[in-house]
Amino acid sequence: MKRVLFVTNHPGFSKFNKPYMEWFKQQGWIVDNASPGAGVGPVDNQYNISIHRSPFSFDNLKAIFQLRKIINENHYDLIHCHTEMGGVCARLAAIQARKRGTKVIYTSHNYPFYKGSSLLSWLVFFTIEKCLYPLTDAVIAINSEDYELMKRHRMALGKAYMIDGVGVNLKRFSPISLNEKITLRADFGIGTNEFVILYTAQFIPRKNHAMLINTVPTLLKVIPNLRIVFAGSGVLFDKCKQLAQELGIKDYFLFLGERTDIDTICRISDIHVSTSKLEGQGINNIEAMACGCPLVVSKVRGHRDVCKEGRNGFLFALNKPQDLVASIIKLYQDKELYTKISEQNKVDAQKFSVEREVSEMGKIYKEVLGYI
């Protein structure tokens, strides 16, 4: 039987790989996954490999040796690696396997080097990727900036591909009626007439929650019925709650923590905001779009591929919080514009359906394996 191995440096990432794992199972393949901690998905073997996010961690040396042993014992036909260090460790571990015919694909969800990033990022991460060029049979981007970079700098022996992200389950993320929305809001203690801003993201520095929190006093002058909903956990969770407390606005927030009902939370919201400093694509935005939420997102790579100014919502520069405020107020006050964008987003989200992405990835897998 044919065998495929998925490798990431985060166990939760396997939920994004699940549809692709299922695709291989349907083709009769044995599917294995390697990540730090147990993932989820239809895998035959789950390997707990401690891959660290930092390229300077000694854990990664151990991970490379562990992966090499697994790869050499199982004779994989294909290895698909994700995340920066998951990609580094897997490709180094597969050196001997590639000589025996194993194909290795790396999907970049967010290159650490990009236009505007630090010189150190280019010196470290760009150099690493260029050194891994002869160990990579194909690279895949999920945003246009990374894709152009892949083509310009030749990041793999084979082709560079672009897909529209990992895909969203549009049966799960879909709009509901106004009456259903009102009923669901009651479960969260949210009033019928409140204007709900949602931000689903981990509380980590690059997600930049503080920017949105700091705009709330200004927003309240125009939107007194405002409610901010944060779904996610992370190292800055308590610090952000404290900031809302210090500003005297904590009663306008719902800090929900880690959730498994993001589809429901998107459906009770009016708009989705992302103040992220860096994004590969931002599946949180697409999930909200599919439920009819207009977007107000930072003008960074990834976001620019999803949000088209005035069509899906609005983009703002990170150094201009006043533009973030103005865009939110515009959607609040202009009901006709809000409805137009909301309806358009339900249509545009179809481009990001998981079925479409699995179909596109299936073509890439076959091409890399030489089946077509």
Image (cartoon, rainbow, N blue to C red):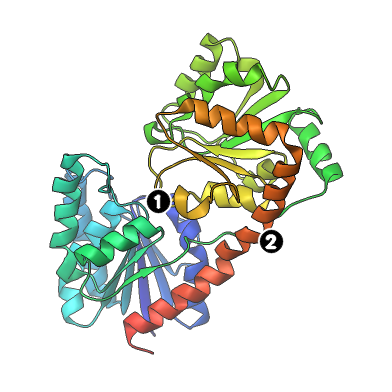
Residue 229 percent location from the top left of the image: 62, 31
Out of 241 and 162, give the one closest to the viewer.
162
Instruction: Give whichever of 20, 121 is nearer the camera.
Output: 121
Q: Residues within 10 Å of mark 2 (few under 14, many from 20)?
A: few
Q: Secondary structure at mark 1?
A: loop
Q: Which mark is residue 171?
A: 2
Q: Marks 2/1: CA distance? A: 24 Å
Q: Earlier in the sequence, mark 2 or mark 1?
A: 2
Residue 104 picture location, percent across and down: 27, 72
Where 190 sits versus 127, above or below? above
Please identify the quarter of the rendering in which residue 370 is found. bottom left
Q: Is residue 360 left or right of residue 145?
A: right
User: Is 328 rendered above or below residue 97?
Assistant: above
Crowdedness near tag 1: few (<14), some (14–19) or many (≥20) residues, C-alpha within 10 Å: many
Indicate the secondary structure of the residue bearing disc 2: loop
* Residue 38 seen in the figure: no
Which of the 4 image quadrants contains residue 78?
bottom left
| Residue 97 visible in the shown view | yes
In the rendered structure, the answer to whether residue 252 lies left or right of residue 283 reads right
In this view of the protein, which residue sits in the foreground, 58 or 119?
119
Q: Which residue in the protein does label 1 denote?
A: 280
Kindly identify the residue that appears in the image at 62 percent across and 59 percent down: 348
- In the rendered image, which quarter is residue 354 located in? bottom right
Quadrant, the C terminus: bottom left
* Mark 2: amino acid: Lys
| The N terminus lies in quadrant | bottom left
The mark total stands at 2
Instruction: Single out the residue that lies furthest toward the right.
Output: 179
Q: Amino acid at mark 1?
A: Gly
Image location (x, y in percent) of residue 75: 27, 78
Q: Nearer the viewer, mark 2 or mark 1?
A: 1
Tell me the residue at 82%/37% (across/down): 182
